[in-house]
Amino acid sequence: MKQQQQRTVVLYPSPGMGHLITMVELGKLIHLRLRLPVTILIASPPFNLGNPTPYINAIESSDLGISFHYLPQPLDFSHQDHNAQHHELLVFKFLNACNPHVKDKLELISKSSTILAIVVDFFCVASISVAAANLGSPVYVYFTSPAGALASCLYHNELHRRSDVSFRHLNVDLHIPGIPPLPSRDMPLPMLDREDTYFCLLESSSQMCRAQGIILNTFDALEPRALQAISDGLCTPNGSTPPLHTIGPVITAEKKMDSDAECLNWLDSQPDRSVVFLCFGSLGRFSVDQLAEIADGLERSGQGFLWVVRGPARGPGPALASEDPDLEALLPRGFLERTHGKGLVVKSWAPQVRVLSHEAVGGFVTHCGWNSVLESIIAGVPMVAWPLYAEQRINRVLLVKEMGLAIAVQEGTDGLVGAAEVERCVRLLLESEEGSALRERAAEARDAGAAVVREGGSSWAGLARLADEWVVRAGTTKGS
Ligand code: UDP
């Protein structure tokens, strides 16, 4: 009976555009390279992490072999949790509440298809027991951050065992296998205090070790030390680590939209490598004071710039900023007129992949989100690391100290980055010898990243091995 069934790979991303987009890209790879249909489960939270519907509709209508199944809203998810200090806690609680629906959906899918594998986002690892217990399909974690962040995540249990002082108060460099010394305060914000989110993350890193494997959006030549340390079990001294599968860099291939034309046309009019691009992910936003410092720094640098500006947060919690910020009101008086022609400010969103690959762009001021970092690497663009949330402070350490692809922005004691610092970073990137050296390393990383995804490259082979594992296992299960 099962032999006649269609086969599928089920992907389960966590809410948030960054997580969804990279999972869809993985789905496209699985379908195009391995010719396997892909089913993506979508959990729609009752809080705003960006509206995925237009994106999902576009993917569905482009006939990529990917179908989406929406999970029903869990009735027992309490609205009181919406004031949680860290949106990660909301996401964990919401996804936990979704688990019974995940179970039902998987059972439904398995009636018509053989589920070769289930690939879940790190935030969805609690569903591993649900999935494994009910179906026997192998469950993999797709870790959408660098291997260095995975090392710190896996080593969290060991750090927790060694000290009962919070990372906020520890005030030491953490020595995590495979990565440079990491100031304890550079651990992700929700991990700094031993509160609910800290314990959710601790538990999730243990649960991750129950997966059949961990798929990583990175490549061997970019993070050899971290990958080796994890594979050697150094990050899980009291347990085992699932096998690693590196398949990156997996990045979005953007389609041209009419709304993109203005900034791309403007870049066409700029000299090669004369423009710094400033963009801070899907959620990054600044206070009016910080926007003023950035504006002042850009103006003083005299360099070209393309800057994506969002309105400041309207209140606590993860709600997105206004999508239509009033630039005149947010930026210093006269800034837009004075910099006209030299710089361009766009509201809320720019076609980042296309911008980074434009010849006019010579540097990228980034919040260090991992997708942004990979996109910059693939474009061969050196970076200024300005982390804001999630694991981005770890990524900064990796980018600056391990990979040599970025310089770090220095925050003042009040947390603000002053205009002089913005000016220094932009000049360094576009004008200095240090900037040229960074650019050379960025070009090497770009070439290495392009080579690994070609036939025979390490990431190409990583995906092929994974598919073999799925198919062989399914065959064995059928036969047994
Ligand atoms: N992005 C974009 N334009 C923007 C802001 C973000 O295209 O103005 C894309 C960016 O190219 C990347 C994703 O959104 O693919 C952001 O993912 P990342 O992991 O860098 O950061 P996150 O948003 O998850 O913090």
Image (tube, rainbow, N blue to C red):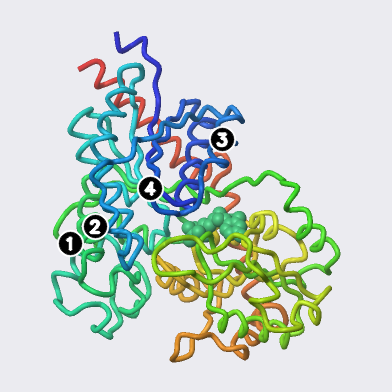
Q: Residues within 10 Å of mark 3 (few under 14, many from 20)?
A: few
User: Helix, strand, or loop for circle 4?
Assistant: loop
Question: Disc 1 versus disc 4: distance between alpha carbons?
Answer: 36 Å
Nearer the camera: disc 3 or disc 1: 3
Estimate how packed mark 1 is, as few (under 14), some (14 to 19) or many (20 or more) residues with alpha carbons within 10 Å.
few
Q: Which disc is residue 237 wearing?
A: 1
Q: Residue furthest right?
A: 269
Tag 2: amino acid = Gly
Cα separation between marks 1 and 2: 6 Å
Q: Residue at x 35, y 69 (%)?
A: 188
- Badge nearest the viewer, 2 or 3: 3
Which residue appears at 69% of the width and 54% of the height? 354
Residue linked to disc 2: 233
Q: Is residue 370 above or below residue 10?
A: below
Res 326 → quadrant: bottom right
Q: Mark 1 near mark 2, Cβ–Cβ under 8 Å?
A: yes
Kind of residue indicated by mark 4: Pro
Amino acid on which disc 1 is placed? Pro
Element marked by disc 1: loop
Count of residue discs: 4
Question: How far is mark 3 from mark 1, CA to CA?
Answer: 45 Å
> Which is more N-terminal, label 4 or label 3?
4
The quarter in which the C terminus is drawn is: top left
Identify the mark at residue 57; answer none if there is no mark.
3
Of mark 2 and mark 3, the one earlier in the sequence is: 3
Kindly indicate whether the residue at mark 3 contacts the one at mark 2 (C-beta within 8 angstroms).
no
Q: Quadrant of residue 425?
A: bottom right
The amino acid beneath tag 3 is Asn
User: Closer to the observer: label 4 or label 2?
Assistant: 4
Name the residue nearer the viewer: 111 or 375.
Answer: 111
Quarter of the displayed picture in which ligand 1 can be seen: bottom right
